[in-house]
Image: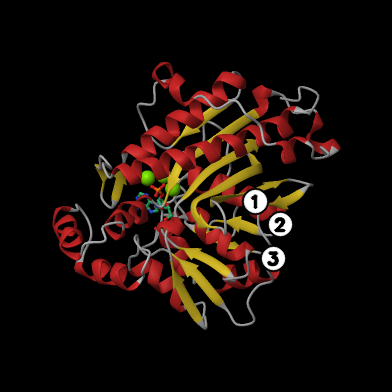
């Protein structure tokens, strides 16, 4: 690795390589078919892919950047047992980036990295069903699946490939409580000749790994497909959108904004945590967008911050769309979430 590149550039380059490796782990576990699903709470599951991918990311980054504080979604990821997963490559394209003056003086001690090893776990476990080509085998798996309703099962059958494309690996880099760099890796993105893609963003540099798109002509909202409730629905109704897309994962929804498939991401509920939004917010910022809670306030990403994003998520590719969304949310709803 080029030791001459400034720390933040090296860390982002390492994060890109580590996210690619984690994505391969996620795919390999799915191919083996033993997901090892554990229920953490209501509508909250963990699989062997979440656990192994996190072990890979934390072991690899902490071996190379020992003083960086790294916080992952999953518990019980002892670093000692993870040498098989060590990834020490660093992406060459990122290493060759010109580091802006504003990021040159950053030290390891100033950095907090937020890791979501697998964002869209609900969609990942449902994707396992779609890999069963035999309808009878698929039906049997559905019957033993812990949390797929009949409505979801039917929507899965209609979706042809399931929702695996919604799954992402998220590595967010924050300094002084603000997200300044991030990686969104999509293990199941279908390219012509290879599986997966890695999107990155760095403050005062820009974004890469995809083709940015302008916001759609009409107002298209993207929101949750697996964690809705009456307040979430209320916040959608007031937007007066031409269309509402219901997809999985915070990473995937921000990708939809970046690619011009949706205008605003609205989620008026406390379910997302700091590891869900740190990387997406960093990439969105680097593309000129904005991610806040539904009141329009920024989240802070210091190591001692509480994990839940209690007051929801509101994101857009530009200030104008973001302002529109903040203004549409009724005060009563804002009060309810911040109570
Ligand atoms: N109620 C919840 N419980 C646990 N995780 C949640 C909840 N709501 C949202 N999340 C996390 O935020 C992501 C985005 O939410 P949604 O897909 O509903 O829009 C989810 O994929 C999940 O991350 P993860 O899959 O990493 O556990
Ligand atoms: Mg989870
Ligand atoms: Mg997540
Ligand atoms: Mg996760």
Q: Which mark is residue 283?
A: 1
Work out whether residue 26 or residue 322 is closer to the camera in this orientation and state it.
Answer: 26
Q: Is residue 226 above or below residue 155?
A: above
Pointer 3 residue Cβ closer than 8 Å to ligand 1: no
Work out whether residue 161 or residue 319 is closer to the camera in this orientation and state it.
Answer: 161
Residue 295 seen from this side: no
Which residue is label 2 attached to? Answer: 287
Q: The residue tagged with tag 3: helix, strand or loop?
A: loop
Percent position of residue 19, x then y? 54, 39
Percent position of residue 322, x then y? 63, 66
Rendered-image quarter of ligand 2:
top left
Percent position of residue 73, x then y? 42, 37
Discs 1/3, front? 1
Q: CA distance from mark 2 to mark 3?
A: 9 Å
Q: Earlier in the sequence, mark 1 or mark 3?
A: 1
Q: Residue at x 60, y 36 (%)?
A: 17
Quadrant (top left/top right/bottom left/bottom right) for the C terminus: bottom left
Dot 3: few (<14), some (14–19), or many (≥20) neighbours within 10 Å? some
Q: Residue at x 38, y 39 (%)?
A: 50
**Residue farthest to the right?**
101
Is label 1 in contact with label 2 (beta carbons under 8 Å)?
yes
Q: Residue at x 51, y 56 (%)?
A: 189
Which residue is label 3 attached to? Answer: 318
Q: CA distance from mark 1 to mark 2?
A: 6 Å
Residue 202 seen from this side: yes
């Amino acid at each position: 690795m080029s030791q001459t590149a400034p720390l933040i550039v090296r860390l982002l380059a390492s994060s890109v390589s580590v996210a690619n490796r984690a994505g391969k782990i996620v795919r390999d576990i799915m191919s083996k078919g033993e997901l090892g699903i554990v229920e953490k709470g209501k509508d909250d599951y963990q699989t062997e892919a979440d656990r192994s991918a996190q072990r890979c990311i934390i072991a690899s980054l902490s071996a190379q950047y020992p003083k960086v504080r790294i916080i992952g979604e999953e518990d019980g990821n002892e670093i000692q047992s993870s040498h098989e997963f060590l990834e020490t490559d660093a992406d060459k394209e990122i290493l060759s980036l010109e580091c802006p003056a504003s990021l040159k003086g950053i030290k390891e001690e100033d950095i907090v990295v937020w890791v979501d090893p697998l964002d869209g776990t609900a969609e990942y476990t449902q994707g396992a069903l779609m890999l069963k080509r035999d309808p009878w085998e698929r039906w049997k798996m559905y019957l033993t699946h812990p949390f797929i309703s009949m409505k979801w099962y039917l929507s899965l059958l209609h979706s042809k490939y399931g929702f695996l494309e919604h799954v992402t690996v998220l590595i967010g880099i924050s300094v002084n409580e603000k997200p300044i760099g991030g990686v969104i890796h999509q293990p199941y993105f279908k390219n012509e000749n290879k599986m997966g893609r890695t999107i990155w963003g760095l403050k005062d540099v820009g974004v890469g790994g995809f083709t940015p798109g302008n916001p759609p002509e009409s107002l298209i909202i993207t929101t949750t497909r697996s964690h809705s409730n009456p307040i979430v629905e209320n916040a959608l109704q007031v937007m007066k959108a031409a269309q509402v897309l219901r997809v999985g994962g915070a990473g995937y929804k921000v990708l939809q904004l970046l690619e011009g498939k949706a205008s605003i991401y609205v989620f008026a509920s406390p379910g997302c945590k700091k590891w869900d939004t740190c990387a997406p917010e960093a990439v969105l910022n680097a593309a000129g967008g904005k991610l806040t809670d539904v009141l329009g306030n920024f989240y802070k990403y210091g190591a001692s911050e509480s994990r839940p994003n209690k007051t929801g998520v509101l994101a857009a590719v530009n200030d104008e769309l973001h302002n529109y969304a903040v203004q549409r949310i009724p005060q009563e709803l804002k009060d309810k979430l911040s109570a």
